[in-house]
Image: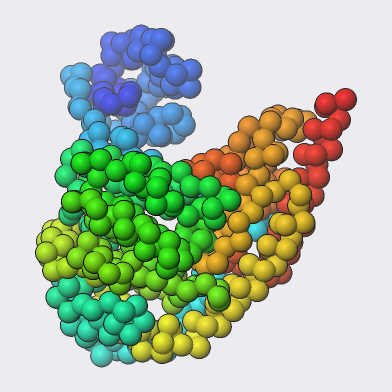
Amino acid sequence: MTAVQFQLGRCMYFAADIRDATRLRKLGSSTHLSPSRRIISQSIQKRSTVPGKADSHIVARSSKQFTEMDITTENGSADTLTELDIALSPRVVSLQPSKTMAISDKALSMSESGIPVIRLAAGEPDFNTPEAVCKAGIKAIQEGYTRYTPNAGTLELRAAICQKLQEENGLSYKPNEILVSNGAKQAILQAVLAVCSPGDEVIIPAPFWVSYPEMARLADAKPVIVPTLLNDDFLLRPEDLSSVLTERSRLLILCSPSNPTGSVYPRNLLEAIAAVVAKHPRLLVLSDEIYEHIIYAPARHTSFGSLPGMWKRTLTVNGFSKAFAMTGWRLGYLAAPKHFTDACNRIQSQATSGASSVSQKAGVAALHLGYAGGEDVAVMVRAFQERRDFLVKRLRALKDVKLSVPEGAFYLFPDFSSYFGSEVGDYGVIHDSESLCEFFLEKAQVALVPGSAFGEPRCIRISYAASLESLQVAMENIEKALDTIKSLAKASSK
Ligand SMILES: Cc1ncc(COP(=O)(O)O)c(C=O)c1O
Protein backbone atom coordinates (compact mmCIF):
# COMPACT_ATOMS: atom_id res chain seq x y z
CA MET A 1 0.00 0.00 0.00
CA THR A 2 1.26 3.50 -0.77
CA ALA A 3 1.28 5.74 2.28
CA VAL A 4 2.25 9.32 2.80
CA GLN A 5 3.57 10.91 5.97
CA PHE A 6 3.77 14.66 6.03
CA GLN A 7 3.85 17.59 8.39
CA LEU A 8 1.73 20.70 8.17
CA GLY A 9 2.08 23.43 10.73
CA ARG A 10 2.04 21.73 14.11
CA CYS A 11 0.70 18.37 13.00
CA MET A 12 2.24 15.26 11.55
CA TYR A 13 -0.08 13.30 9.22
CA PHE A 14 0.05 9.72 8.01
CA ALA A 15 -2.01 9.41 4.87
CA ALA A 16 -2.86 6.01 3.45
CA ASP A 17 -2.86 5.55 -0.30
CA ILE A 18 -4.86 7.52 -2.80
CA ARG A 19 -7.84 8.27 -0.59
CA ASP A 20 -5.66 10.18 1.79
CA ALA A 21 -3.60 11.56 -1.02
CA THR A 22 -6.81 13.23 -2.16
CA ARG A 23 -7.28 14.54 1.34
CA LEU A 24 -3.70 15.73 1.08
CA ARG A 25 -4.45 17.53 -2.14
CA LYS A 26 -7.36 19.29 -0.43
CA LEU A 27 -5.03 20.37 2.33
CA GLY A 28 -2.49 21.44 -0.24
CA SER A 29 -4.96 23.72 -1.94
CA SER A 30 -6.27 25.07 1.34
CA THR A 31 -5.81 28.78 1.77
CA HIS A 32 -3.92 28.16 5.04
CA LEU A 33 -0.91 26.78 3.23
CA SER A 34 1.92 28.75 1.70
CA PRO A 35 2.36 28.38 -2.11
CA SER A 36 5.51 26.29 -1.65
CA ARG A 37 3.65 23.80 0.55
CA ARG A 38 0.87 23.61 -2.00
CA ILE A 39 3.36 22.64 -4.70
CA ILE A 40 4.89 20.05 -2.44
CA SER A 41 1.62 18.40 -1.55
CA GLN A 42 0.76 18.21 -5.23
CA SER A 43 4.13 16.66 -5.90
CA ILE A 44 3.58 14.11 -3.14
CA GLN A 45 0.25 13.26 -4.61
CA LYS A 46 1.78 12.90 -8.03
CA ARG A 47 4.61 10.73 -6.78
CA SER A 48 2.35 8.59 -4.65
CA THR A 49 0.41 7.57 -7.74
CA VAL A 50 3.43 6.76 -9.88
CA PRO A 51 2.87 3.30 -11.46
CA GLY A 52 5.25 0.65 -10.19
CA LYS A 53 5.78 2.46 -6.88
CA ALA A 54 2.78 0.92 -5.22
CA ASP A 55 4.77 -0.37 -2.26
CA SER A 56 6.58 2.83 -1.41
CA HIS A 57 5.63 5.50 1.01
CA ILE A 58 6.77 9.07 0.91
CA VAL A 59 8.08 10.76 4.00
CA ALA A 60 8.85 14.38 4.73
CA ARG A 61 10.87 14.05 7.88
CA SER A 62 10.52 17.63 9.08
CA SER A 63 8.58 20.72 8.19
CA LYS A 64 11.81 22.24 6.84
CA GLN A 65 12.34 19.30 4.53
CA PHE A 66 8.71 19.45 3.59
CA THR A 67 9.00 23.11 2.64
CA GLU A 68 12.16 22.47 0.67
CA MET A 69 10.51 19.61 -1.27
CA ASP A 70 13.22 17.31 -0.04
CA ILE A 71 11.04 14.25 0.13
CA THR A 72 12.39 10.75 0.40
CA THR A 73 10.73 7.50 -0.57
CA GLU A 74 10.72 4.61 1.88
CA ASN A 75 8.96 1.31 2.28
CA GLY A 76 6.19 1.19 4.81
CA SER A 77 2.50 1.43 5.30
CA ALA A 78 -0.06 3.33 7.29
CA ASP A 79 -3.74 3.07 6.99
CA THR A 80 -5.09 5.51 9.54
CA LEU A 81 -5.01 9.28 9.63
CA THR A 82 -3.19 10.22 12.85
CA GLU A 83 -2.65 13.66 14.29
CA LEU A 84 0.38 14.17 16.49
CA ASP A 85 0.59 17.36 18.50
CA ILE A 86 4.12 18.65 18.06
CA ALA A 87 3.38 22.07 19.58
CA LEU A 88 6.35 23.66 21.33
CA SER A 89 6.36 25.41 24.66
CA PRO A 90 5.47 29.14 24.44
CA ARG A 91 8.85 29.66 26.16
CA VAL A 92 10.62 28.48 23.01
CA VAL A 93 8.20 29.97 20.52
CA SER A 94 8.81 33.50 21.83
CA LEU A 95 12.60 33.02 21.95
CA GLN A 96 14.58 35.00 19.37
CA PRO A 97 17.35 33.09 17.59
CA SER A 98 20.74 34.80 17.90
CA LYS A 99 21.27 37.25 15.02
CA THR A 100 25.01 37.19 15.57
CA MET A 101 25.00 33.44 14.93
CA ALA A 102 22.75 33.86 11.88
CA ILE A 103 25.02 36.37 10.15
CA SER A 104 28.14 34.41 11.09
CA ASP A 105 26.59 31.30 9.53
CA LYS A 106 25.70 33.17 6.34
CA ALA A 107 29.22 34.62 6.10
CA LEU A 108 30.71 31.17 6.67
CA SER A 109 28.64 29.61 3.91
CA MET A 110 29.68 32.44 1.53
CA SER A 111 33.34 31.76 2.45
CA GLU A 112 32.83 28.05 1.87
CA SER A 113 31.44 28.75 -1.58
CA GLY A 114 34.63 30.65 -2.45
CA ILE A 115 33.59 34.26 -1.74
CA PRO A 116 36.34 35.92 0.34
CA VAL A 117 34.21 37.33 3.16
CA ILE A 118 35.95 39.26 5.95
CA ARG A 119 34.19 38.08 9.05
CA LEU A 120 33.83 40.84 11.64
CA ALA A 121 30.63 39.51 13.16
CA ALA A 122 31.85 37.01 15.72
CA GLY A 123 32.41 37.76 19.38
CA GLU A 124 35.48 35.59 19.56
CA PRO A 125 39.16 36.55 19.92
CA ASP A 126 41.24 35.57 16.89
CA PHE A 127 44.16 34.51 19.11
CA ASN A 128 45.10 31.06 20.29
CA THR A 129 44.72 30.04 23.91
CA PRO A 130 48.02 30.81 25.73
CA GLU A 131 50.46 27.93 25.55
CA ALA A 132 50.74 27.36 29.30
CA VAL A 133 46.96 26.99 29.47
CA CYS A 134 46.90 24.47 26.62
CA LYS A 135 49.69 22.50 28.26
CA ALA A 136 47.74 22.31 31.50
CA GLY A 137 44.78 20.89 29.58
CA ILE A 138 46.96 18.32 27.80
CA LYS A 139 48.59 17.31 31.09
CA ALA A 140 45.16 16.86 32.66
CA ILE A 141 44.16 14.45 29.90
CA GLN A 142 47.47 12.58 30.01
CA GLU A 143 47.21 12.16 33.77
CA GLY A 144 43.70 10.78 33.48
CA TYR A 145 42.06 13.85 35.00
CA THR A 146 38.99 13.07 32.94
CA ARG A 147 36.22 12.33 35.39
CA TYR A 148 33.31 14.29 36.84
CA THR A 149 34.33 17.09 39.16
CA PRO A 150 32.17 18.46 41.98
CA ASN A 151 29.12 20.21 40.54
CA ALA A 152 30.32 23.65 41.67
CA GLY A 153 33.80 23.13 40.21
CA THR A 154 37.04 21.87 41.71
CA LEU A 155 38.14 23.42 44.98
CA GLU A 156 41.49 24.16 43.32
CA LEU A 157 39.81 26.36 40.67
CA ARG A 158 37.33 27.97 43.04
CA ALA A 159 40.14 28.87 45.43
CA ALA A 160 42.14 30.37 42.53
CA ILE A 161 39.07 32.40 41.49
CA CYS A 162 38.64 33.70 45.07
CA GLN A 163 42.27 34.81 45.12
CA LYS A 164 41.90 36.54 41.73
CA LEU A 165 38.72 38.33 42.81
CA GLN A 166 40.38 39.52 46.01
CA GLU A 167 43.58 40.75 44.39
CA GLU A 168 42.26 42.19 41.13
CA ASN A 169 38.71 43.21 41.98
CA GLY A 170 38.66 43.94 45.70
CA LEU A 171 35.94 41.30 46.14
CA SER A 172 35.98 38.84 49.05
CA TYR A 173 34.39 35.47 48.43
CA LYS A 174 34.80 32.04 49.94
CA PRO A 175 35.07 29.00 47.62
CA ASN A 176 31.49 28.01 48.52
CA GLU A 177 30.32 31.32 47.07
CA ILE A 178 31.76 30.45 43.65
CA LEU A 179 30.04 28.33 41.01
CA VAL A 180 32.05 27.25 37.97
CA SER A 181 29.90 26.77 34.85
CA ASN A 182 30.14 25.71 31.23
CA GLY A 183 30.83 29.26 30.05
CA ALA A 184 29.69 32.60 31.45
CA LYS A 185 26.51 32.24 29.41
CA GLN A 186 25.36 29.36 31.59
CA ALA A 187 26.30 31.30 34.73
CA ILE A 188 24.12 34.25 33.60
CA LEU A 189 21.14 32.12 32.62
CA GLN A 190 21.22 30.24 35.92
CA ALA A 191 21.48 33.49 37.87
CA VAL A 192 18.45 34.92 36.05
CA LEU A 193 16.49 31.70 36.57
CA ALA A 194 17.47 31.56 40.23
CA VAL A 195 16.43 35.07 41.27
CA CYS A 196 13.52 36.00 38.98
CA SER A 197 9.95 34.94 39.62
CA PRO A 198 7.33 35.04 36.86
CA GLY A 199 6.38 38.64 36.13
CA ASP A 200 9.50 40.13 37.72
CA GLU A 201 11.19 42.89 35.77
CA VAL A 202 14.76 42.64 34.54
CA ILE A 203 16.26 46.05 33.77
CA ILE A 204 18.53 45.92 30.74
CA PRO A 205 20.25 49.04 29.40
CA ALA A 206 20.34 49.08 25.59
CA PRO A 207 22.47 48.44 23.60
CA PHE A 208 22.63 45.05 25.32
CA TRP A 209 24.25 41.69 24.77
CA VAL A 210 21.78 39.69 22.67
CA SER A 211 21.09 36.99 25.25
CA TYR A 212 20.00 39.11 28.25
CA PRO A 213 16.38 39.80 27.20
CA GLU A 214 15.92 36.23 25.99
CA MET A 215 17.22 34.86 29.27
CA ALA A 216 14.76 37.07 31.17
CA ARG A 217 11.96 35.67 28.98
CA LEU A 218 13.13 32.11 29.64
CA ALA A 219 12.65 32.86 33.34
CA ASP A 220 9.10 34.14 32.60
CA ALA A 221 10.33 37.56 33.68
CA LYS A 222 9.80 40.79 31.75
CA PRO A 223 12.79 42.50 30.14
CA VAL A 224 12.58 46.27 30.68
CA ILE A 225 14.84 47.89 28.12
CA VAL A 226 16.31 51.28 29.05
CA PRO A 227 17.79 53.09 26.03
CA THR A 228 21.11 54.90 26.39
CA LEU A 229 22.60 57.51 24.06
CA LEU A 230 25.68 57.49 21.86
CA ASN A 231 26.45 60.97 23.22
CA ASP A 232 26.57 59.45 26.73
CA ASP A 233 28.90 56.71 25.43
CA PHE A 234 25.94 54.36 25.74
CA LEU A 235 26.15 54.45 29.55
CA LEU A 236 23.07 54.17 31.73
CA ARG A 237 22.04 57.41 33.43
CA PRO A 238 21.10 56.92 37.10
CA GLU A 239 17.96 59.06 36.59
CA ASP A 240 16.85 56.81 33.71
CA LEU A 241 17.30 53.77 35.93
CA SER A 242 15.35 55.45 38.68
CA SER A 243 12.48 56.28 36.32
CA VAL A 244 11.84 52.63 35.30
CA LEU A 245 11.99 51.01 38.74
CA THR A 246 8.80 49.50 40.13
CA GLU A 247 8.04 47.09 42.96
CA ARG A 248 8.45 44.27 40.40
CA SER A 249 12.02 45.27 39.51
CA ARG A 250 14.25 42.37 40.50
CA LEU A 251 17.46 42.44 38.50
CA LEU A 252 19.56 45.10 36.80
CA ILE A 253 22.05 43.70 34.28
CA LEU A 254 25.23 45.70 33.78
CA CYS A 255 27.98 44.77 31.32
CA SER A 256 31.29 46.59 31.54
CA PRO A 257 33.31 46.65 29.32
CA SER A 258 30.27 46.27 27.14
CA ASN A 259 29.35 44.02 24.29
CA PRO A 260 28.36 45.56 21.82
CA THR A 261 29.54 49.13 22.53
CA GLY A 262 32.94 48.66 24.19
CA SER A 263 31.90 51.28 26.78
CA VAL A 264 33.41 51.08 30.24
CA TYR A 265 31.50 52.35 33.27
CA PRO A 266 33.67 54.76 35.28
CA ARG A 267 33.66 54.25 39.02
CA ASN A 268 31.81 57.48 39.82
CA LEU A 269 28.93 56.55 37.50
CA LEU A 270 28.69 53.09 39.06
CA GLU A 271 28.56 54.76 42.49
CA ALA A 272 25.67 56.94 41.34
CA ILE A 273 23.88 53.85 39.98
CA ALA A 274 24.56 52.02 43.26
CA ALA A 275 22.91 54.90 45.14
CA VAL A 276 19.71 54.32 43.11
CA VAL A 277 19.91 50.53 43.55
CA ALA A 278 20.39 50.88 47.33
CA LYS A 279 17.01 52.61 47.71
CA HIS A 280 15.14 49.68 46.20
CA PRO A 281 14.11 46.87 48.55
CA ARG A 282 14.46 43.93 46.16
CA LEU A 283 16.71 45.04 43.33
CA LEU A 284 19.76 42.85 42.63
CA VAL A 285 22.52 43.51 40.11
CA LEU A 286 24.06 41.03 37.72
CA SER A 287 27.47 42.41 36.80
CA ASP A 288 28.81 40.77 33.63
CA GLU A 289 32.57 41.38 33.74
CA ILE A 290 33.68 38.95 31.06
CA TYR A 291 35.62 41.63 29.13
CA GLU A 292 37.30 43.12 32.22
CA HIS A 293 40.88 42.50 31.04
CA ILE A 294 40.29 43.85 27.54
CA ILE A 295 40.41 47.49 28.54
CA TYR A 296 42.44 50.45 27.25
CA ALA A 297 44.16 52.88 29.61
CA PRO A 298 43.29 55.27 31.11
CA ALA A 299 39.99 53.39 31.49
CA ARG A 300 39.89 51.16 34.57
CA HIS A 301 37.57 48.34 35.48
CA THR A 302 35.47 48.56 38.63
CA SER A 303 33.57 45.55 39.95
CA PHE A 304 30.07 46.62 40.95
CA GLY A 305 30.07 44.26 43.94
CA SER A 306 33.10 46.05 45.40
CA LEU A 307 31.15 49.31 45.86
CA PRO A 308 30.00 50.08 49.42
CA GLY A 309 26.83 48.19 50.30
CA MET A 310 26.62 46.37 46.95
CA TRP A 311 28.27 43.00 47.76
CA LYS A 312 25.09 41.45 49.12
CA ARG A 313 23.05 42.57 46.09
CA THR A 314 25.51 41.63 43.37
CA LEU A 315 25.93 38.50 41.30
CA THR A 316 29.27 38.82 39.54
CA VAL A 317 29.79 36.80 36.35
CA ASN A 318 33.11 36.33 34.66
CA GLY A 319 34.75 33.77 32.42
CA PHE A 320 37.75 32.65 30.45
CA SER A 321 36.43 32.91 26.86
CA LYS A 322 37.44 36.46 25.99
CA ALA A 323 40.53 37.51 27.94
CA PHE A 324 42.23 34.12 27.68
CA ALA A 325 40.96 33.30 24.17
CA MET A 326 39.29 30.16 25.54
CA THR A 327 35.86 30.26 23.86
CA GLY A 328 35.89 26.54 23.06
CA TRP A 329 36.89 25.43 26.54
CA ARG A 330 33.49 26.56 27.88
CA LEU A 331 34.47 27.90 31.27
CA GLY A 332 32.88 30.70 33.26
CA TYR A 333 31.82 31.39 36.82
CA LEU A 334 29.47 33.12 39.20
CA ALA A 335 30.56 34.79 42.44
CA ALA A 336 27.70 35.75 44.73
CA PRO A 337 26.44 35.49 48.31
CA LYS A 338 26.06 31.80 49.21
CA HIS A 339 22.26 31.90 49.16
CA PHE A 340 22.30 32.79 45.43
CA THR A 341 25.25 30.58 44.50
CA ASP A 342 23.54 27.60 46.15
CA ALA A 343 20.38 28.22 44.11
CA CYS A 344 22.36 28.37 40.86
CA ASN A 345 24.28 25.28 41.93
CA ARG A 346 20.99 23.43 42.29
CA ILE A 347 19.90 24.41 38.77
CA GLN A 348 23.26 23.40 37.32
CA SER A 349 23.15 20.04 39.13
CA GLN A 350 19.96 19.16 37.24
CA ALA A 351 21.14 20.58 33.92
CA THR A 352 24.76 20.00 32.98
CA SER A 353 26.58 19.15 36.24
CA GLY A 354 30.09 20.52 36.58
CA ALA A 355 32.22 22.03 33.82
CA SER A 356 34.80 19.95 31.98
CA SER A 357 37.53 18.61 34.28
CA VAL A 358 40.16 19.32 31.62
CA SER A 359 38.99 22.92 31.16
CA GLN A 360 39.06 23.50 34.90
CA LYS A 361 42.73 22.50 35.06
CA ALA A 362 43.34 24.87 32.14
CA GLY A 363 41.41 27.58 34.00
CA VAL A 364 43.70 27.26 37.01
CA ALA A 365 46.69 27.70 34.68
CA ALA A 366 45.06 30.77 33.12
CA LEU A 367 44.63 32.39 36.53
CA HIS A 368 48.27 31.63 37.29
CA LEU A 369 49.48 33.53 34.19
CA GLY A 370 49.88 36.59 36.37
CA TYR A 371 48.00 39.72 37.39
CA ALA A 372 45.21 40.37 34.83
CA GLY A 373 46.49 37.47 32.74
CA GLY A 374 50.11 38.61 32.67
CA GLU A 375 52.04 39.15 29.45
CA ASP A 376 50.01 36.58 27.44
CA VAL A 377 46.86 38.65 27.86
CA ALA A 378 48.70 41.99 27.62
CA VAL A 379 49.97 41.05 24.13
CA MET A 380 46.39 40.44 22.95
CA VAL A 381 45.12 43.64 24.56
CA ARG A 382 47.85 45.70 22.84
CA ALA A 383 46.88 44.19 19.48
CA PHE A 384 43.19 44.94 20.13
CA GLN A 385 44.05 48.51 21.04
CA GLU A 386 46.05 49.03 17.85
CA ARG A 387 43.10 47.75 15.81
CA ARG A 388 40.64 49.91 17.72
CA ASP A 389 42.78 52.99 17.07
CA PHE A 390 42.99 52.15 13.37
CA LEU A 391 39.22 51.69 13.03
CA VAL A 392 38.38 54.77 15.07
CA LYS A 393 40.57 56.89 12.79
CA ARG A 394 39.01 55.49 9.62
CA LEU A 395 35.44 55.72 10.90
CA ARG A 396 35.94 59.26 12.15
CA ALA A 397 37.00 60.24 8.64
CA LEU A 398 33.53 59.17 7.44
CA LYS A 399 31.61 62.34 8.11
CA ASP A 400 28.20 60.66 8.03
CA VAL A 401 29.02 58.10 10.70
CA LYS A 402 28.71 58.87 14.42
CA LEU A 403 30.97 57.08 16.86
CA SER A 404 31.58 56.77 20.57
CA VAL A 405 35.17 55.69 21.13
CA PRO A 406 35.16 52.35 22.96
CA GLU A 407 37.46 51.88 25.93
CA GLY A 408 37.26 48.12 26.16
CA ALA A 409 36.16 44.77 24.66
CA PHE A 410 36.82 44.32 20.92
CA TYR A 411 33.80 46.00 19.36
CA LEU A 412 32.89 49.33 17.82
CA PHE A 413 29.28 50.37 17.54
CA PRO A 414 29.01 53.22 15.02
CA ASP A 415 25.74 54.88 14.03
CA PHE A 416 25.15 54.52 10.28
CA SER A 417 21.57 55.81 10.31
CA SER A 418 22.37 58.71 7.95
CA TYR A 419 22.47 56.08 5.18
CA PHE A 420 19.01 54.71 5.93
CA GLY A 421 16.38 55.48 3.31
CA SER A 422 18.95 55.58 0.48
CA GLU A 423 17.92 54.00 -2.81
CA VAL A 424 20.72 51.77 -4.10
CA GLY A 425 19.88 50.81 -7.70
CA ASP A 426 18.98 47.14 -8.13
CA TYR A 427 19.56 46.51 -4.46
CA GLY A 428 16.55 48.61 -3.48
CA VAL A 429 16.25 50.79 -0.42
CA ILE A 430 18.54 50.53 2.60
CA HIS A 431 15.85 50.65 5.24
CA ASP A 432 17.78 49.97 8.41
CA SER A 433 20.89 48.43 9.93
CA GLU A 434 19.77 44.96 8.81
CA SER A 435 19.54 45.89 5.14
CA LEU A 436 22.78 47.88 5.41
CA CYS A 437 24.54 44.82 6.89
CA GLU A 438 23.18 42.68 4.05
CA PHE A 439 24.43 45.28 1.59
CA PHE A 440 27.88 45.27 3.22
CA LEU A 441 27.95 41.48 3.14
CA GLU A 442 27.03 41.28 -0.53
CA LYS A 443 28.81 44.34 -1.93
CA ALA A 444 31.75 44.79 0.43
CA GLN A 445 32.08 41.15 1.47
CA VAL A 446 32.29 42.20 5.09
CA ALA A 447 30.17 40.47 7.72
CA LEU A 448 28.91 42.78 10.49
CA VAL A 449 26.01 42.53 12.93
CA PRO A 450 23.00 44.90 12.73
CA GLY A 451 22.43 46.97 15.85
CA SER A 452 18.82 45.78 15.99
CA ALA A 453 20.18 42.55 17.48
CA PHE A 454 21.42 44.61 20.43
CA GLY A 455 18.41 46.90 20.80
CA GLU A 456 19.87 49.90 18.90
CA PRO A 457 18.79 49.71 15.25
CA ARG A 458 20.73 52.82 14.16
CA CYS A 459 24.08 51.18 14.76
CA ILE A 460 26.16 48.30 13.44
CA ARG A 461 28.57 46.22 15.51
CA ILE A 462 32.06 45.79 14.15
CA SER A 463 34.13 43.14 15.89
CA TYR A 464 37.84 43.79 15.52
CA ALA A 465 38.86 40.30 16.54
CA ALA A 466 40.60 40.06 13.17
CA SER A 467 44.07 40.94 11.86
CA LEU A 468 44.97 44.56 11.07
CA GLU A 469 45.42 43.55 7.40
CA SER A 470 41.86 42.16 7.28
CA LEU A 471 40.55 45.31 8.94
CA GLN A 472 42.34 47.48 6.36
CA VAL A 473 40.71 45.59 3.47
CA ALA A 474 37.36 45.62 5.28
CA MET A 475 37.47 49.40 5.72
CA GLU A 476 38.42 49.97 2.08
CA ASN A 477 35.50 47.78 0.98
CA ILE A 478 33.08 49.50 3.37
CA GLU A 479 34.20 52.95 2.21
CA LYS A 480 33.67 51.95 -1.43
CA ALA A 481 30.23 50.52 -0.64
CA LEU A 482 29.26 53.73 1.17
CA ASP A 483 30.50 55.79 -1.81
CA THR A 484 28.25 53.69 -4.05
CA ILE A 485 25.29 54.42 -1.78
CA LYS A 486 26.07 58.14 -1.79
CA SER A 487 26.48 58.41 -5.55
CA LEU A 488 23.35 56.35 -6.32
CA ALA A 489 21.34 58.28 -3.75
CA LYS A 490 22.54 61.56 -5.35
CA ALA A 491 21.65 60.31 -8.84
CA SER A 492 18.14 59.22 -7.79
CA SER A 493 17.46 62.54 -6.06
CA LYS A 494 18.18 64.51 -9.30
C1 LIG B 1 28.75 40.17 27.33
C2 LIG B 1 28.94 38.69 27.26
N1 LIG B 1 28.65 37.96 28.34
C3 LIG B 1 28.78 36.63 28.35
C4 LIG B 1 29.22 35.95 27.23
C5 LIG B 1 29.31 34.45 27.28
O1 LIG B 1 30.60 33.98 27.23
P1 LIG B 1 30.97 32.43 27.40
O2 LIG B 1 29.73 31.67 27.58
O3 LIG B 1 31.71 32.07 26.15
O4 LIG B 1 31.85 32.36 28.61
C6 LIG B 1 29.52 36.67 26.07
C7 LIG B 1 29.93 35.97 24.83
O5 LIG B 1 29.80 36.44 23.73
C8 LIG B 1 29.39 38.07 26.09
O6 LIG B 1 29.69 38.82 25.02
Residue 380 seen by the camera? yes
Measured along the vertical axis of the image, is residue 209 above or below residue 364?
A: above
Place of residue 156 in the rendered image (x, y in percent of width and height, measured from the top left): 22, 85
Closer to us: 90 or 53:
90
For residue 417, what is the image quadrant? top right
- Can you say which quadrant of the picture contains the C terminus? top right
* Residue at x 51% of width, y 43% of height: 456
Image point (61%, 73%), residue name:
385
Q: Position of residue 318 (x, y in %)?
A: 34, 69
* Viewport quadrant of the N terminus: top left
| Figure colour scheme | rainbow
Camera sees residue 256: no
Q: Quadrant of residue 255?
A: bottom left
Q: Residue at x 61, y 61 (%)?
A: 405
Among the 4 quarters of the image, the one containing residue 306: bottom left
Left or right position of 327 against 61: right
User: Is residue 466 positioned above or below 104 on the image?
Assistant: below
Of the pair 223 and 307, the residue shown nearer to us: 307
Apparent side of residue 218 relative to residue 428 in the rendered image (left or right): left
Left or right of 130 on screen, residue 275: left
Is 284 on the left-hand or right-hand side of 363?
Answer: left
Residue depicted at x 24% and y 53%:
279
Residue 400 image offset from top left, x and y in percent: 73, 46
Spot occupied by residue 210 in the image (x, y as percentages of width and height): 42, 49
